[in-house]
């Protein structure tokens, strides 16, 4: 799985050529990985041309064009990236924040579409990430009966979960 994503340019390492499998990923890094893994990003396209950026994004940030692409890419009811919708961070993306499982599942399944009909034991009906956790269970993203929504996502988690999707349907990645 690691070789596949490295060979396809999805993971390029940490700058020193190392994968750092247990390193945590930021929101902007996961956005880049998902868009490139799915083939939904063209570096020569300006995705920000007709987009109202989130409050903490702008030209000069390495991830700006990726975030704009995520804001314009829509499979289901919502685009891949919506930013925070409530609270003190409403209207922000917070690109340097580490991604937890609930946020990661939302990004993945807003990009690829929602599937599944059963959920993890620790996911309550009606929580904002319920359908995304259901899809994560469908693809067996996380072992056991617990989703662990607040757990942060590592590089290895992303590689393993995307590989599971690739094995289930090679057309996705």
Image (cartoon, rainbow, N blue to C red):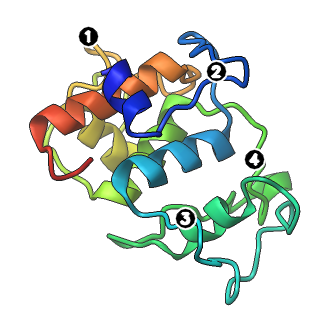
For marks 3 and 2 on the same chain, the one whose residue lies earlier in the sequence:
2
Q: Position of residue 78 (x, y in %)?
A: 45, 70
Dot label at residue 144: 1
Instruction: Say which residue appears at 48% left-offset and 69% top-offset.
Output: 79
Q: Which residue is mark 3?
A: 70
> Which residue lies at the image location 78% right of the left edge and 39% below the top edge?
96
| Residue 155 vs residue 78, the one in the foreground | 155
Q: Gap between marks 1 and 4, in whole Å?
A: 30 Å
The reply to whether dot 3 and dot 4 touch (C-beta < 8 Å) is no
The location of residue 63, given as percent across then percent down, is 72, 54
Dot 3 falls on a residue whose secondary structure is helix
Label 4 – label 2 distance at C-alpha: 13 Å
Is 120 situated left or right of 148 in this image?
left
Badge 4 density bin: few <14, some 14–19, many ≥20, Cα 10 Å: many
Q: Which mark is residue 24?
A: 2
Q: Is the Cβ of the residue at disc 3 closer than 8 Å to that at disc 2?
A: no
Report, in whole angstroms, how far the alpha carbon at label 1 lies from the one at label 3.
30 Å
Q: Observer-nearest residue: 137 or 171? A: 171
Q: Circle 2 sits in a helix, a strand or a loop, which is it?
A: loop
Crowd tier of the residue under label 1, counting other residues whose Cα lies within 10 Å: few below 14, some 14–19, many 20 or above: few
Tell me the element at label 4.
loop
The one nearer the camera, 41 or 141, is 41
Mark closer to the chain start, 1 or 2: 2
Disc 3 packing (10 Å; few <14; some 14–19; many ≥20) = many
Which residue is at a point 16% across and 52% down the rendered structure image? Answer: 171
Q: Is residue 146 above or below residue 126?
A: above
Is residue 70 in view? yes
In the picture, measured across the screen, residue 145 lies left or right of residue 16, that is left
């Amino acid at each position: 799985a690691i070789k596949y994503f490295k060979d396809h340019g999805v993971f390029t390492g940490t700058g020193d050529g190392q994968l750092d499998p247990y390193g945590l990923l930021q929101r902007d890094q996961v956005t880049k990985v998902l868009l490139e893994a799915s083939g939904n990003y063209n570096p020569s396209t300006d995705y920000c041309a007709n987009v109202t950026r989130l409050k903490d994004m702008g030209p000069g940030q390495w991830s700006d064009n990726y975030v704009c692409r995520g804001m314009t890419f829509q499979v289901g009811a919502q685009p891949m990236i919506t930013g925070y919708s409530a609270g003190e961070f409403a209207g922000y993306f917070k690109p340097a924040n580490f991604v937890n499982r609930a946020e990661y599942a939302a990004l993945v399944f807003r990009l690829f579409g929602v599937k599944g009909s059963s959920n993890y034991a620790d996911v309550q009906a009606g929580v904002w990430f319920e359908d995304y956790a259901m899809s994560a269970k469908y693809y067996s993203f996380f072992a056991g009966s617990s989703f662990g929504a607040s757990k942060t996502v590592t590089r290895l988690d992303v590689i393993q979960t995307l590989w599971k999707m690739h094995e289930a349907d090679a057309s996705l990645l």
